[in-house]
Amino acid sequence: MSGTYDPGPQIAQVGGINLGTKNLESSLWFFRDVLGMEEVLRDGQTAYLRGYQELVHHSLVLTEQSDAVVNSYSLRTQRPEDVELFHQHLQRQEIDVVELPSGREAGRGEAIRFLLPGGDHPFELYYDIEKPLAIESLRSRLPSNSSRRRGLGVRRIDHFNIQTDPGRINHAERWVRENLGFKRREFAKFADSETIMASWMSVTPQMHDLAIVANSLEKSGQLHHVAFNLENFSDSLTAADVLRDLDVSYGTGPGKHGIGQAMYLYVHDPGSDHRVELYSGGYLILDPDWEAIEWKPVDFPEGLTWYGDPIDTVPGSRGRDTTNSAPLRPDSLAS
Ligand SMILES: [Fe+2]
C-alpha cells in the first residue's frame, strides 16, 4: 500500500428529517415542550430542533405546509468531499440530482437531493453543519450535552423506518447497501418468496440506522416512523405515563422488539400525525464478520414485538396508513 488510505465516499450517520406539518405550533408543543427537544431556530414557518446530546444545529425540521409529507431524509457523509463524490456516483447511474445551496436548511452546508431508487423517498446528503451553543439558560454543565436534559429526554435522532412497494423493495434495499454502504443486520422475507418483507441496516454499530419495510398497500415513498433515542427503558415507561396524561395518541407500546432488542413506544405528533418512535436500548454490532440474522415469517411478529402490543408493520395487522414523501423538485421544501 502506498499513499494515503482512501476508503471512498461513505455515509457517517442519519442526520435529520424534515417533516411537513399542518400545525407548526402543535408539532412544536409535542417535540419541544413534551419531548424536550431544543428549538434552535425559528425561520418563518420553519423550526429547527435537536436533542440534548446533539451538538449539531438540528436533526429535526418542522415545516408548516398544506400537506404533511416528509420533505427529506438527510444523511451526513463521512468527509466534506464525499458529497461531491456521491453526486458523481449518482450521475454515473443517471439518477436525477438536485443541488441544494448552503443554507437551504439553516445551519447546513451544500447538499444533494435525489429520490431513493426503488423507494422514491427524498434523500439528502450533506457534510457541513454548524454547531451552535444553546442559549445560556438552556446550557448543560456537561460539555457533551448541547442543552440541559428536559421534558421526556430525547437525546438524538436514531433511525428512519421507510416503506416501499413489495414489487420494488428488493431493488431499494440492495441499492442502499451497494451504493450508500449500509450493511444488512437483520431481515425477513415473505413466505416461500425471495421478496424482502423488512430489512434493518446500518452504517454505524447500531443494529439499524435505516429500516426498509414492504408496504402492505403496495405504496412507495412512505414513512412508517422516525425514531428518537431515549437513554434507557425506564424513560420509555415515564414517557408512556406522561403522554397518557396529556392525551397524546399512542397505540403501540411500550414494548420490546425481538429484532434489535430495543424498547419502543410509538406516538403520533398531534400537529402532523407523523408516527414517531421513542426508542431506547438495543444492542451494538462491533464484529466485522457479522452475518445478517434472518427472521422466518412465522417468527416475524415476535421479532417486531418481543413483548407489548403488536406493531402494524405486519401486513394485515391494525394501524393507520403511512405518510407520503415529497417528490424530487427543487422547490419541494417550499411551504
Ligand atoms: Fe423503529
Image (cartoon, rainbow, N blue to C red):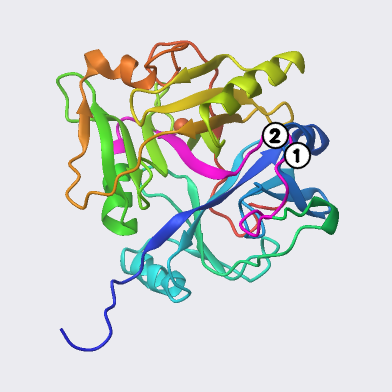
Task: Give the dominant element type of the magenta stretch: helix, strand or loop.
Answer: loop
Out of 72 and 17, give the one closest to the viewer.
17
Q: Amino acid at mark 1?
A: Arg
Q: Secondary structure at mark 1?
A: helix
User: Considering only vertical position in the picture, is 31 above or below 318?
Assistant: below
- Position of the N terminus, as image quadrant, is bottom left
For residue 143, what is the image quadrant?
Answer: bottom right
- Residue 158 in the magenta stretch? The answer is yes
From mark 2 to mark 1, how far is it between C-alphas? 6 Å
Most extreme residue toward the bottom, as rendered? 3
* SS category of the residue bearing label 2: loop
Q: Which mark is residue 14?
A: none
x and y percent of residue 50 in the render? Answer: 67, 49
Q: Nearer the viewer, residue 78 or 275?
A: 78
Residue ID at (59%, 41%): 70
Q: Which residues are magenta?
A: 142-170
Residue position for label 2:
35
| Residue 155 seen from this side | yes
Q: Position of residue 207 (x, y in %)?
A: 35, 40
Say which of 306 and 66 sits in front: 306
Using the image, determine if residue 234 lies above or below residue 229.
above
Q: Is residue 205 magenta?
A: no
Q: Residue at x 27, y 34 (%)?
A: 186
**Which residue does the image show at 33% across and 27% down from the upper left?**
259
* Location of residue 248 in the rendering, given as x and y in whole percent from the top left corner: 71, 19
Which numbered dot is residue 32? Answer: 1
Q: Nearer the viewer, residue 130 or 88?
A: 130
Residue 102 locus on image (x, y percent) = 64, 71
Asked if labels 1 and 2 touch by Cβ distance under 8 angstroms, the answer is yes
Where residue 238 sits, quadrant-wise, is top right
